[in-house]
Amino acid sequence: MAASAGHLRPGRYLALFALIVIVLYALVFLTGNHKPTPKLGIDLQGGTRVTLTARTPDGGQPTRESLNQARQIIERRVNGIGVSGTEVLLDGNNVVITVPGEQGDQAKNLGKTAKLGFRKVVANATQPVVPPQTTTPPPATGTPTSGAPKTSAPPSATSGAPTTTKSGGGGAPAAAPAQQQSTTPAAPSSSATPPPAPTPAPSDGSVDAQTAQQIQAAKAVRQNPQLIGADGQPNQELVAKAMASLTCAPNAKDALEGNDDPKLPLVACGDHNTYKYLLEPEFLPGTEIADSTSGYDQQRGQWVVNLSFKSAGTKTWADFTSKNTGQQAAFVLDTQVVSAPNIQVAILDGNTQITGKFTQSEAKDLSDILKYGSLPLSFASSDATTVSATLGLASLQAGLIAGGIGLLVVFVYCLFYYRLLGVLTILSLALSGALVFAVLVLLGRWIGYTLDLAGIAGLIIAIGITADSFVIYFERLKDEIREGRTFRSAVPRGWVRARRTILASDAVSFLAAAILYVIAVGDVQGFAFTLGMSTVLDLVVVYLVTHPLVAMVSTSKNAFLSNPRHLGLGAVQQVGSQRKKSTSVGRANVKEA
């Protein structure tokens, strides 16, 4: 036997729903530094979306690991544009770059293959423009340690300049001679580097004349073959000029990024813009790296990076470390020195350990960068879409208008057909909308979910799914009343029958949305996500709001609320009364017979 409406205690359900809403909106307004609005996709706020398709030299499928590492490299480039809100996501074998606003033109050509190589450090100089304390501490830090074959990273920007046996040239301050087990910072010479001139605009992969001129101008100064003489010593005048032309600062643009010639010397930034390096031509390409991992060394009590090479790379690395013990080897990624450790001993088997004052994340980042050099992925731009801010605003307005029209139609239908119960439907829809809004805002902050036009379409369809749950419940109430029951007794019985149908209906909708989300890509996933999320929230509203409100109305002693005509139940109650009367007459006739 179904419980009576009075046993439901609807106040508890409504209080629980109110608590959920209060907690959600407390998180919306009291956490995060963003506006309390959902994060919008570029089709709503304007911007650029580029889809890059990965390809391997042999035409095979790239591994998930290589794609993740490629995404990290491309993400560093995208962040270098300096636009907030950029995203780099994996979509199957594609890397999708999203840059909001009107500064995303450079994103169209960010998929060029990252080039990692090893160069010998000839000289280094501190960067006078960007004070060390204003930069993020570099990943390779600490004091070299002795023991098994390994290399160790130089001191960080906050503890001093790295040591080396080579001297700088011209206006660049020369580094002090290297001392094993020493982290003494290099003392700048009296001839300080003059303030660097503005660096040319970066190459974004295009082939226009202006970009080509910028690349050639940078190469002529920073990759001049005469930077290093035949005796291996730097040309002081040319090195000073090259270093003065280079600006090492966060998000500084480098025309040579990805365009440097590995066969020529190079002047480059490194250690998070703390040092400028003069480097010899590349002696070992990053494709010779076999593996790179990070881990915690229990003996040293610090995080380390373990590096191994392929057979040819092992021989080259062994020859280099044997001849250059005490020198620095720079790991260069797209003209940026990501690490320049000191070589302590000859490493003959290729198994190299890089030590320093790494944090766990710094060790992992360096390991990923090095490992990427062994994964020769390239990308083809398969799709590039640019949406203006004006068009995005128009799309948002169109979506809101469509949603408003959908809600209005549902409201009119509910008021016309269910009257007071229709008012409860409208209230439930409003509360459902408030719940969905808060969840969208929080998901945008926590997981970076962006609401696009496809997502808005999912929300509009979810309005119908939510309204359908109310229709099922109310029609079950009518069935009970048609059988001769009162409104009060029909509510618990109708709910028991309706909730099974509601659960089955929502389960089918959620399953369809989940399958669509798994097998689909791009915008269709946004549609499936909002549809599935709204379906789940529909159950929350029906169980915690709609049913308790109907139960409260059924037990109300207010004459207006208890009037069946005001509830849209007048006609079915007459049918129920006639059926009940005819049933009573039938029983009386049977008794007389």
Image (cartoon, helix red, strand yellow):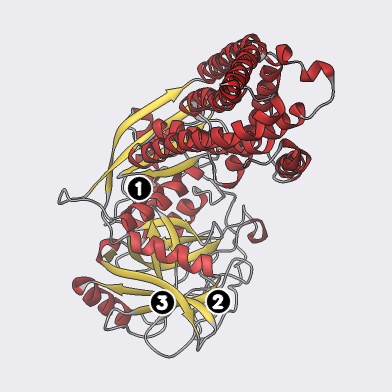
Kindly identify which numbered label has been placed on residue 142: 2
In the rendered image, which residue does mark 3 sit on?
327
Hey, which residue is sitting farthest front in the picture?
A: 593
252 or 463: nearer the viewer? 463
Circles 2 and 3 in contact, beta carbons < 8 Å: no
Q: Which one is in front in this view, the residue at disc 2 or the one at disc 3? A: 2
- The reply to whether callout 3 and callout 1 are in contact (CB within 8 Å) is no
Q: Where residue 93 sits: x, y (%)?
A: 30, 45
Badge 3: few (under 14), some or many (20 or more) residues near its Cα, within 10 Å? many
Q: Earlier in the sequence, mark 2 or mark 1?
A: 2
The amino acid type, in three-letter code, at marker 2 is Gly
Name the mark on residue 258: 1
Task: Kindly tell me whether residue 570 is visible in this rendering.
Answer: yes
Above or below: residue 93 compared with residue 331? above
Q: x, y percentage for residue 501?
A: 49, 33
Residue drawn at 72 percent across, 46 percent down: 31
Q: What is the residue that sits farthest to the left in this orientation?
A: 58
SS at mark 2 in the image: loop
Query: How many neighbours does mark 2 have within 10 angstroms: few (below 14), some (14-19), or many (20 or more)?
Result: many
Can the viewer see residue 36?
A: no
| CA separation in Å, label 3 and label 1 | 26 Å
State which quadrant residue 45 falls in: top right
Nearer the N terminus, badge 3 or badge 1?
1
Residue 240 tag number: none
Asked if the residue at tag 1 contacts the one at tag 2, i.e. Cβ–Cβ closer than 8 Å, the answer is no
Residue sticking out furthest to the right: 558
Q: Residue at x 54, y 26 (%)?
A: 472
